[in-house]
Amino acid sequence: MTSEQNVSERFIAHYEAQKGALPAAGLGWLGALRGRALAGFTATGLPTPRSEEWKYTSLAPLARLPFVPATAAKNGLTAAALPWLLPGPSAAHRLVFVNGRLRQDLSAPGALPRGVGLTSLAAALADEPELLAGRLGSLGTLAEEPMLALNTAMMADGFVLRLGRECRLEHPLELLFVALSKGEPVAYHPRGFILAEAGSRGSVVEQHIGRGGAPYLANMASEILIGEGAELRHFKLIAEADQGFHISTAHVEVAARGRYESFVLTQGGRLARNEIRVRLDGPGAACALDGAYLGSARQHIDNTTFIDHAKGHTTSDEVYKGVLDGYARGVFQGRILVRPDAQKTDGRQTCRTLLLSEGAEIDAKPQLEIYADDVKCSHGAAAGALDEEALFYLRSRGIPEEASRHMLVEAFLAEVVERITEEPVREAFRGVLARALARKVGGTGA
Amino acid sequence: MEAMLHIRNLRVEVGGKPILKGLDLAIGAGELHAIMGPNGSGKSTLAYVLAGREGYEVTEGSVSYKGRDLLAMSPEERAGEGLFLAFQYPVEIPGVSSTNFLKTALNAVRKYRGESELDAMQFLKLVRQKTKALGITDEMLKRAVNVGFSGGEKKRNEVLQMAVLEPSLAVLDETDSGLDIDALRIVADGVNALRSPARATLVITHYQRLLSHIVPDRVHVLAHGRIVRTGGKELALELEAKGYAEFVEAA
């Protein structure tokens, strides 16, 4: 038996032990969904590099860890110690999740506009299951996505955001996910659900961090439904602790004239995989998937995206830029599918990586599958070292070597960070990057 | 008294190939020297070696600057000590605004010299004074360093950096190349404005025309890696008239 099989059985045992205690155990449709999900996960087990989707990211390091299911952490954190990203007036709606479960005592949802609903997943399942019935678990393929299936079987809590027709959420919703892992490594499976009805608009900022010093697995899944003409901006900072594993699968469906914008900044965690799968499902539907990452030591950072141009006149734009130092490894898989009827599709994809050391490595795999003939699609992937000419130029003006390196790395990433459309978020992410650079990237580049 | 810059028997190889073959040069405070020479004579190598660029191997000789061993210093130390190289080909740095670059450089140099760093307001005031004379607009300062700049704009930007950093020894490497006559005058005015009894300047050029605007105290001819002739400002005119043929053949 491989170690992946071992850990798969451990997760299945978690489910058997927990299922009675999972929220809304009495809901028939939910029980059936969890059952299908568990069957899917049992059939495949944890993903291995043998599957195309996981070719460059091995979960073998996970398999050696004796995970236990995370239980509700009632204390161990104070509100004052939480590293919120958004300042003053933008900090209107805040929720804190510890080991995947909402901590009301640390949260401040604030006053929400009429027509906007925000609640924990557990509360939504108890109080308004009709909102989620037929929608929760509707995106994705449980038989083919083991981590999504595992999340669906095990999801204990998370958030549900509903933007009613034509509603505007003026300030971003800020979600802080904290892993609290002391002693035995914990695994938890938070779930996000966003329903943006026709003409609505809002933004969500997610931040993932870890405390406690022990390894943990945060296996998140999100479903995002964007109605006609609706617009959702989704910003995410993965700043997990050094021993943290972060795996996330987001499924997004965008109706006609709707728009989804995503920006993922990854800087922390032993292994982080962020997968986004978008279906552009009506004319005028658009998405922008952007990301920046900064890896050092032996970090592994995987950004996997799939954009399905299911209908004509749809647009996608994608820019990922990363900086890798030490023995860090990056993965970018960007698949774009243009279906036969999706004429007048416009798809652009760029992936650029800066390798600061001999030991750093990137696997970049752009993948365009075009079955329509009247489309505009482009992709480019490039990796290189820091520009020595530019470095000398800065130093010749008196700027010390380490500061010069940081300036050039920041400049490299600035191009993509500038694409963040929400000003306070852009400022916050800039600050995060500058601090991460100072901490992680050495002056010699070794 | 020791000259500000004293180069003795400097021998430099690039990729194992000898470029400078025993170069001697001394420049005192308050002086402006010009080095002229044909292409491939080692002019740019000299500039880069003085600024501390990697890839230039000094196999023999010494360079003393203000009484210290220049070759033992890092590029940023040299800048802190007041050495400035105006690049022949200023480097484009996408993503770094000219303002941010200038401010970071100035404060790094001030810090090195034990002076207080300037805040944004003080810095802006200083830069406004300098940009006006050089015809550099606020819009140029907002752009990324040298990105999308014309040849002339790049050279003016070099002179702006020099004016802001106030070097003791300025080395100008082919600063006149690619300039039209108006830009040449602006650049020359910028260089002349900085001349003082405490400062020294080394102008490296292929052509005489810049030296009509920046009048040198001494002119040296560099050929095949050595100074082969030294004279007054009239030597530049002679070279303009006769060309470098005699020096190219002589070696």
Image (cartoon, rainbow, N blue to C red):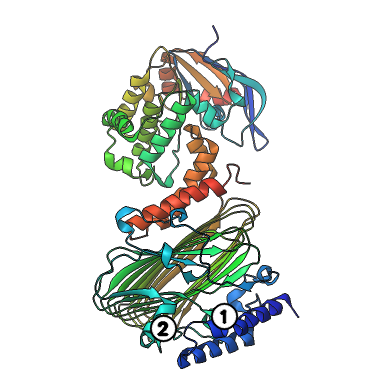
Q: CA distance from mark 2 to mark 1?
A: 22 Å
Q: Give A208 or A323, whichever is nearer the viewer.
A: A208
- Left or right: where does residue A378 sit relative to residue A328? left
Q: Secondary structure at mark 1?
A: helix
Q: Residues within 10 Å of mark 1 (few under 14, many from 20)?
A: many
The reply to whether residue B205 is visible in this rendering is no
Q: Residue at x 42, y 23 (%)?
A: B240
- The percent coordinates of residue A369 (x first, y second) are 48, 79
The residue that mark 2 highlights is: A126
x, y percent for residue A315:
35, 74
Of all chains, the one bearing label 2 is A
Reply above or below: A33 against B57: below
Give residue B251's quadrant in the image. top right
As helix, strand or loop, the secondary structure at mark 2 comes to: helix
Residue at x 49% of width, y 26% of height = B112
Q: In the rendered image, which quarter is residue A223 located in?
A: bottom left
Residue type at mark 2 is: Ala
Any mark on residue A167, and which? none
Q: Is residue A271 above or below residue A118?
A: above
Q: Between residues A401 and A144, which one lies in front from this camera angle?
A: A144
Q: Do the residues under discs 2 and 1 have CB atoms within 8 angstroms?
A: no
In this view of the protein, can residue A288 be seen by the observer? yes
Name the mark nearer the viewer: 2 or 1: 2
**Location of mark 1 (residue):** A150
Are the residues under badges 2 and 1 in a single subunit? yes
- Image label count: 2
Q: Amino acid at mark 1?
A: Leu
Q: Residue B248 location in percent, x, y?
A: 55, 26
Question: Label 1 marks which chain's residue?
Answer: A
